[in-house]
Each structure stands twice: as structure tokens, then as C-alpha cells.
Amino acid sequence: MKLPPLSFFPFLVWFKLITKNSLKADMLAGLTGAVIVLPQGVAFATIAGLPPEYGLYTAMVTPVIAALFGSSFHLVSGPTTAISIVVFSAISHHADPGTPEFLSLTLTLTFLAGVYQLAFGLARLGALVNFVSHTVVIGFTAGAAILIASSQIKHITGIFVPKGESFFHTWIDLYQGIGTLNFYLLLIAII
């Protein structure tokens, strides 16, 4: 089955539909999306163990690529919490966060993920997502939320937990360090 070239470049179809009014509305929507996505990008880069500027780069480049080659007119694309956690957990066992080796491995992982994503897109395998049950998605989301909370609780308690610890080791370290709990920090975090 031969696919038309326009199916690989959706922007060639919708580019003709842009008017002065729709461009103004799109610019406003883009600005609104940027106000939300840019600070999130910094936070997600920190969660992934990367310098904050990499979150800004990701937040700026991803929406442009998604707008040109994506299939949705209404989707705000950018870095996500789940991806940040997966990147951190995949790379932190091989290199210490913040080191040049960690950054190099992260960029390699990102490149390989992009190659796979491009290959899956060209092979039209996106429909496979329809076979993932809603229960699996909810479980993944809940698991990601627990991992995020666990990785950030050291910042609201002031208890030292080494970077790159597993979920269980993080909670063991938190329990063992309960004597060093910073009540002022915890109070500010609760407020």
C-alpha cells in the first residue's frame, strides 16, 4: 500500500487553511501553551537529572516538530513527567546525574527513542496504542505519581537521600534519616 506524501507531511495540508484570523488565534494559543510548557520543561529536566536548560530546549523544539508532523491540531506537546522518570531511572544506574557521561547517555537514549518513534510512525504502528487497556494506562499513571512523590519527598523533608536510589532504597533512607527531619522545611512545603 503506497501512502501519499501528504500523509507524512500533514503541515502541507493545513498550511493552506491558515487565515489572518486563525493565525492570530494560533499565536495566542501558542503563547498560552508556552507559558505552561516552559516552566514545566525546567521541572521535568530536573526530575530527569538534567540541567534545567535542557528542559527549555525540549519545551521549545518538541512543539514545533509535533505541530509540523503530528496528527492533532489541538495537542500541546512537550516533555512529560513520565518520560522524565523513565529517562532518569534508565540512565542513573549507568552514570551519576549531572555528569557529562549522564548527559551523553541521555542524549543517546533520546536519539534512539526518536529513531524508533520515526520507524514506528513510518510503519503506521501507532494504532497499536488502541490495544493498551485503560487499566494499564491508569496503573502506569498511578505508578509514575508514586515514583515522582518518592523522588521529591527528600526536598520537603531535608533528609539526605543519594541520587539514583531505587524506590525502596529511597524510603529506607528516608526512614533511617527521620532524625534529621527539617521541620521548618516541611512546614513551608505543607503551606
Image: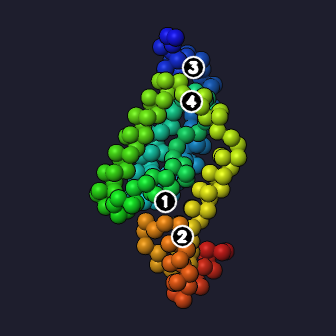
Residue linked to disc 4: 126
What kind of element bears circle 2? helix
Q: Viewer-nearest of labels 2 and 3?
A: 2
Q: Which of labels 1 and 3 is toward the front? A: 1
Q: CA distance from mark 2 to mark 3?
A: 49 Å
Pointer 4 or 2: first along the chain: 4
Residue 129 appears anywhere in the view: yes
Q: Position of residue 68 (x, y in %)?
A: 50, 27
Q: Residues within 10 Å of mark 1 (few under 14, many from 20)?
A: many
The residue positioned 59% from the left and 85% from the top of the image is 183
Identity of the amino acid at label 1?
Ile
Residue under numbered circle 1: 47
The disc, 1 or 4, on the residue closer to the chain's N-terminal end is 1
Q: Earlier in the sequence, mark 2 or mark 3?
A: 3
Disc 3 is placed on an element classified as helix
Instruction: Please state the horizontal and vertical placement of residue 153, each as a whole percent of the image.
Output: 56, 71
Q: Which sits earlier in the primary sequence, circle 4 or circle 3?
A: 3
Decide if residue 159 is on the left or right side of residue 130.
left
Residue 139 or residue 70, whichever sits in front: 139
Q: Amino acid at mark 2?
A: Phe
Label 2: which residue? 168
Residue that carries the numbered disc 3 in the rendered image: 14
Quote the CA–CA distance across marks 4 and 3: 21 Å
Task: Say which element carries label 1.
Answer: helix
- Relative to residue 94, is residue 159 drawn left or right? right
Q: Is residue 4 visible?
A: no
User: Mark 3 belongs to which amino acid?
Assistant: Trp
First in sequence, mark 1 or 2: give its number. Answer: 1
